[in-house]
């Protein structure tokens, strides 16, 4: 009957029919504490999934494996098997060995394990009963989860017997944060890549090669890390290809540990703060754009550096208390990841408007981490815009200074100032593109996830992501939309404000460039006028001596007898006549050309003479 009633209600909603509230079934409580939440914990499925996680020590031909997983070789995982004598019903799986700080050359790693409290929120592992207190190491309960000795991270799977539904001490979430620089952190890359895989990914098939399912997960892990450390692929190329992948078996009746992977990437162009040591070159394993914006005319410069943020999530989709691994990466020199709020900081969740939603709590943690990175994303872009503003140096006090105005209005002969303004405009254009790209990428990622959540029962691959109960499904959809709307709204506000600042700074730069061009044009016009005056003086001198030279050359011929007095007289008369005619025609031409109206009249006279002289047809020609 419940199924029939749910079907009728769904059909009514689809056709826009208002269903009376009394006809709806009572909505079970999902958020409040109580037996309702505790009863959703399926210990058997949790153990089943945990035992599939990667990687324990396996022997396999590493060259074969590395061909698929390169450049994150299995040899660098440094995994050790731990088989401690734990309480009955508890299992220890493996631990990671992380290099010493001195060997990481500025890179860092942070690791935390989380569980769930009675309200369904993510919490730090607690010591609430005797069994948990005996197992959970104190070194793994503090803010820093790294063991004091040996830099060894113990990833014991803290689980109770399948029949026990207590959540105390149970590890459900892993939160890895990496600051990487590509120098000597290959092991950190391998640890991060392994979070998207599981034990089966190291198994071999009958032919001795890695199994197909594992290979697909390895390629996905490689795609995630390559986007962070390699050549940037525009987010448009990632949509529908690598943002989410089902990585488990599609046998719904037999498998209980299917999981799904999402990823999100942002990049930013920031300035290099002087207090940090940026002199060390990046390792060959990380590709970043870096350069200097130079105002050569005034001797000012600005160092620019690309940094990236990447967030990856692998989470179950059939467990009401999801098991998830969250991997967050950033450039080590950028800082900030150590200060990100922990997933178990419940008050931080409330302030961001993000709430857990049972099966989708791993996705909620994904949203929470992305939102916690937005202030850092904004800070780096703001620093870039502010630094460019200081480099332009176009504030009110400078604009009121005549010397400074002349300084920014007059370019050098090799156009250094024009080159600087052009570079600033292009950097701001690229900044606007990157900001918009990050916003578009998040929107499309959320759209992909929403289509996943809204899948109907006709889509068997996705239908089991949410519980079968229509009420639970509705509540989780509402929480999902609220969570991601909170993240997208925050990014829209930040992104639109940044785009507005970029647009204003671009207009400011263009106005300075236009002022430079106008001043240059006026300067060139002034120089052209002076040059014309010089040419006029030269022309006058030439015209003055031209008749004299011409007559002297003519009378210098041997046909003239200078012994005859009349020859001298004719020479003088010829000079006067030719010089007078030349000077008269020259001054008349200057007088006529100097005024537009007279110049037009002179053009008309020449046109009439041309028609009268050349329009007549010569005798004997066709048409005569």
Image: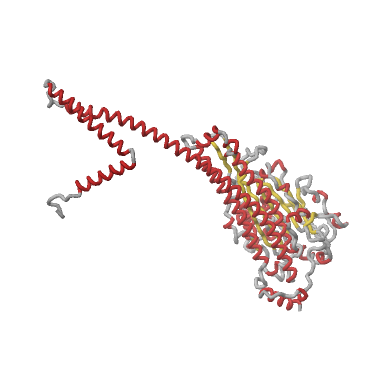
Badge count:
0
- Farthest residue toward the top? 563
Residue 384 picture location, percent across and down: 61, 44
Residue 49: quarter of image: bottom right
Residue 302: quarter of image: top right
Q: Using the image, determine if residue 258 lies above or below residue 82.
A: below
| Quarter of the image that includes the N terminus | bottom right
Q: Nearer the viewer, residue 509 or 309?
A: 509
Q: Nearer the viewer, residue 267 or 482?
A: 482
Q: Nearer the viewer, residue 285 or 342?
A: 342
Q: Using the image, determine if residue 576 lies above or below residue 185.
A: above
Q: Using the image, determine if residue 496 lies above or below residue 481.
A: above
Residue 182 picture location, percent across and down: 64, 45
Residue 554 seen anywhere in this rendered image of the structure: yes
Residue 155 seen anywhere in this rendered image of the structure: no
Residue 563 picture location, percent across and down: 12, 20
Residue 617 picture location, percent across and down: 16, 51
- Relative to residue 37, is residue 362 drawn left or right? left
Q: Nearer the viewer, residue 347 or 579?
A: 579
- Relative to residue 543, is residue 250 drawn left or right? right
Residue 475: quarter of image: bottom right
């Amino acid at each position: 009957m419940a199924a029939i009633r749910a079907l009728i209600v769904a059909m009514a909603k689809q056709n826009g029919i208002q269903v009376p509230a009394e006809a709806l079934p009572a909505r079970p409580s999902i958020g409040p504490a109580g037996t309702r939440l505790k009863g959703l914990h399926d210990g058997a499925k949790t153990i089943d999934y945990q035992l599939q996680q990667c990687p324990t020590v396996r022997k396999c031909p590493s060259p074969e494996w590395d061909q698929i997983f390169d450049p994150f070789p299995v040899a660098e995982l440094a995994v050790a098997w731990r088989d401690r004598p734990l309480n009955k019903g508890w299992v220890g799986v493996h631990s990671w060995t992380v290099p010493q700080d001195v060997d990481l050359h500025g890179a860092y790693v942070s690791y935390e394990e989380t569980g769930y409290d009675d309200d369904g929120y993510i919490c730090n592992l607690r010591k609430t009963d005797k069994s948990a207190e005996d197992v959970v190491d104190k070194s793994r309960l503090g803010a820093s989860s790294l063991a004091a000795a040996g830099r060894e991270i113990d990833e014991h799977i803290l689980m109770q017997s399948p029949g026990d539904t207590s959540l105390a001490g149970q590890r459900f979430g892993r939160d890895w944060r990496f600051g990487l620089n590509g120098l000597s952190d290959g092991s950190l890359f391998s640890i991060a890549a392994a979070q998207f895989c599981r034990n089966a990914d190291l198994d071999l098939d009958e032919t001795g090669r890695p199994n197909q399912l594992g290979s697909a997960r390895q390629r996905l892990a490689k795609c995630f890390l390559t986007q962070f450390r390699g050549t940037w692929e525009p987010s448009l190329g990632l949509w529908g290809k690598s943002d989410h992948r089902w990585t488990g078996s599609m046998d719904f009746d037999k498998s209980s540990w299917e999981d799904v992977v999402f990823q999100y990437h942002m990049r930013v162009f920031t300035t290099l703060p002087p207090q940090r040591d940026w002199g060390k070159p990046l390792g060959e394993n990380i590709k970043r754009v870096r350069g200097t914006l130079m105002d050569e005319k005034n001797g000012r410069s600005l160092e620019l550096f690309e940094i990236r943020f990447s967030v990856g999530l692998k989470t179950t989709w059939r467990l009401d208390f999801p098991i998830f691994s969250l991997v967050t990466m950033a450039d080590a020199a950028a800082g900030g990841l150590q200060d990100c709020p922990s997933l178990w900081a419940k008050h931080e969740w409330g302030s961001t408007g993000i709430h857990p939603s049972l099966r989708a709590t791993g996705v909620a943690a994904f949203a929470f981490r992305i939102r916690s990175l937005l202030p850092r994303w904004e800070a780096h872009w703001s620093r870039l815009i502010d630094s460019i503003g200081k480099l332009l140096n176009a504030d009110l006090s400078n604009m009121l200074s005549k010397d400074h105005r002349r300084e920014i209005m007059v370019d050098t002969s090799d156009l250094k100032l024009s080159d600087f303004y052009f570079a600033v405009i292009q950097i701001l254009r690229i900044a606007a593109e990157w900001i918009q790209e990050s916003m578009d990428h998040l929107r499309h990622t959320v759209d992909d996830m929403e289509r996943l959540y809204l899948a109907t029962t006709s889509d068997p691959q996705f239908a089991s992501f949410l519980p079968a109960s229509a009420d639970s499904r509705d509540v989780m959809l509402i929480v999902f939309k609220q969570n991601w709307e909170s993240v997208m709204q925050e990014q829209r506000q930040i992104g639109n404000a940044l785009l507005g600042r970029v647009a204003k700074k671009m207009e400011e730069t263009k106005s300075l460039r236009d002022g430079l061009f106008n001043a240059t044009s006026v300067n060139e016009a002034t120089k052209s006028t002076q040059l014309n005056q010089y040419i006029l003086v030269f022309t006058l001198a030439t015209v003055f001596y031209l008749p004299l030279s011409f007559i002297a050359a003519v009378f210098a011929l041997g046909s003239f007898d200078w012994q005859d007095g009349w020859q001298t007289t004719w020479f003088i008369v010829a000079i006067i006549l030719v010089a007078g005619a030349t000077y008269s025609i020259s001054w008349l031409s200057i007088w006529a050309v100097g005024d537009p109206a007279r110049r037009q009249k002179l053009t008309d006279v020449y046109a009439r003479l041309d028609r009268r002289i050349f329009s007549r047809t010569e005798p004997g020609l066709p048409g005569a």
